[in-house]
Every structure is written in structure tokens, then in C-alpha cells.
Image: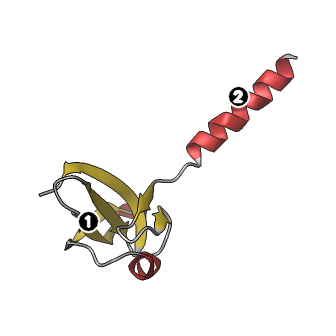
Amino acid sequence: MKPTILVMTLLFGFAAAAQADNFRCPNGAIVSTGDSMSQVYIECDPPSFKNTRTESESGYRGATILINVEEWTYNEGPHRLVHLLVFRNGVLAEVQTLGYGK
């Protein structure tokens, strides 16, 4: 009986860790973290606002790694939540909910 409980606990733990952030586009399509920027562009309507910047990270032996970060904001009005999609090097890395729009 105890091995079964252990196995079930591990399976639920792995399932929770593998969970991705999803975003339902204004047109109803769903995209997830790990999707490419081009795939999200094809699936979703254009964002309300885009912001691009470069971040740096420390790499192997002190090398500096530059990461292209692009943020897309979807603001669908005062009765809907604003969502921020963050792309790192062309891949959807996170989806944030910012509150109600204007």
C-alpha cells in the first residue's frame, strides 16, 4: 500500500512541475509557454503594445550572454484582464496577469 502512495505522490509532483502557463488570445486561440513567437503571432491577434529590450546573464567562464526579451501586452478593455506575454529569445517564457484594462 505504501509504495502506491509514494508513486501517486511522485506522479502528481511531476505533473505540477510540468504545467505550462496558458493564454487565451482575444480571438479564442490558446497558446502556452514554450511556443515560438511566430506561432503566437499566427495564433493570436496583434497585441495592444510591444516592448523590446536586451538582458544580460553571466555565462561560462565569466562570458556575458545577451538575451532578447520582447513583451506583448493584450489590453481588451475595462471589463477584461490585461495580460503580458514575455518572450525570451523568441520563445514564450511567461504569461502575467496585470489587472483590469482601460
Looking at the image, residue 68 lies above or below residue 7: below
Looking at the rendered structure, the secondary structure element under dot 2 is helix
Point out the residue furthest to the top here: 1
Residue 74 marker: 1
Say which residue label 2 marks.
9
Residue 40, image x and y in percent?
Answer: 42, 75
**Residue at the image position 83 percent from the left and 17 percent from the top:** 2
Looking at the image, residue 45 lies above or below residue 72: below
Q: Quadrant of the C terminus?
A: bottom left
| N-term mark: 2 or 1 | 2
Point out the residue furthest to the right here: 1
Looking at the image, residue 80 lies above or below residue 92: above
Q: Quadrant of the N terminus?
A: top right
Using a 10 Å C-alpha cutoff, classify the residue at mark 2 as few (fewer than 14 neighbours), some (14 to 19) or many (20 or more). Answer: few
Alpha carbon separation for disc pair 2 and 1: 37 Å
Looking at the rendered structure, the secondary structure element under dot 1 is strand
Q: Nearer the viewer, residue 32 or 29?
A: 29
**Residue at the image position 39 percent from the left and 80 percent from the top:** 41
**Residue at the image position 16 percent from the left and 54 percent from the top:** 78
Residue 8, image x and y in percent?
Answer: 76, 30
